Amino acid sequence: MKTFTLNNTTYTIRLFDESRDSVEELTDLLHRAYKRLADMGLNFIATFQSVEYTRNYLKKGECYVLESDGKLKGTVFYYTTIWDDAPDIFKQADSVLIGKFAVEPELQKLGLGSMLMDFVESLARERKKNRVVLDTSEKALHLIEYYSKRGYEYKHHWQWPDVNYKSVILSKDL
């Protein structure tokens, strides 16, 4: 858990806890944060996933949330289980995949997303991972630019079966 203050508001990054947190609230946060991508015509799963999908997704790893005043303000997912049809770089023992990265739209560009990314990158280092990998749409140029500024580098393209775009696989050595 990590607590910090930004603009006189206290935020905490911690593990999602189904006994205290709402899967519905988490799903709604993802929908709101990914709306810009939906408006671009990109069908990221997070733009339309159901509450049940989110609940099942929580079993694939560790969901970290950014909380303030008892409300979820952001999230990032640290995968501990990788599916068989994923790119090889996702499956390497010294790599960790992150995803479902989201910050409330009105709080974006304040540095909160960077705090979430710093947190999961630090967690990966603590767990002796050598790199963090992620993917996004090749059409989400604003996200590719964001990740590039954080030191993520293009590795290759990938086509997931359930989306209408080609992904770029990015990684950052730790």
Image (cartoon, rainbow, N blue to C red):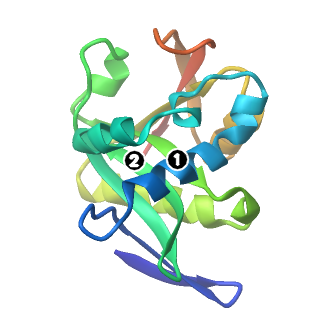
Could you tell me if the residues under marks 2 and 1 are in contact, i.e. CB atoms within 8 Å? yes
Q: Nearer the viewer, residue 72 or 80?
A: 72
Q: Crowding at label 1, few (<14), some or many (≥20) Cα neighbours within 10 Å? A: many
Q: Is residue 35 left or right of residue 167?
A: right
Residue for badge 1: 101
Q: Is residue 124 left or right of residue 109?
A: left
How far across and how far down the image is residue 135, in percent?
A: 52, 28
Q: Residue at x 36, y 35 (%)?
A: 53
Image quadrant in which you'd find residue 51: top left
Quarter of the N terminus within the rendering: bottom left
How far across and how far down the image is residue 59, in percent?
A: 22, 42
In the depicted structure, whether residue 143 falls above or below residue 45: below
Residue for badge 2: 77
The answer to whether residue 88 is seen in the rendering is: yes
Q: Residue at x 23, y 53 (%)?
A: 127
Identify the secondary structure beneath mark 1: strand
Q: Amino acid at mark 2?
A: Phe
Q: Nearer the viewer, residue 18 or 79?
A: 18
Q: Amino acid at mark 1?
A: Phe
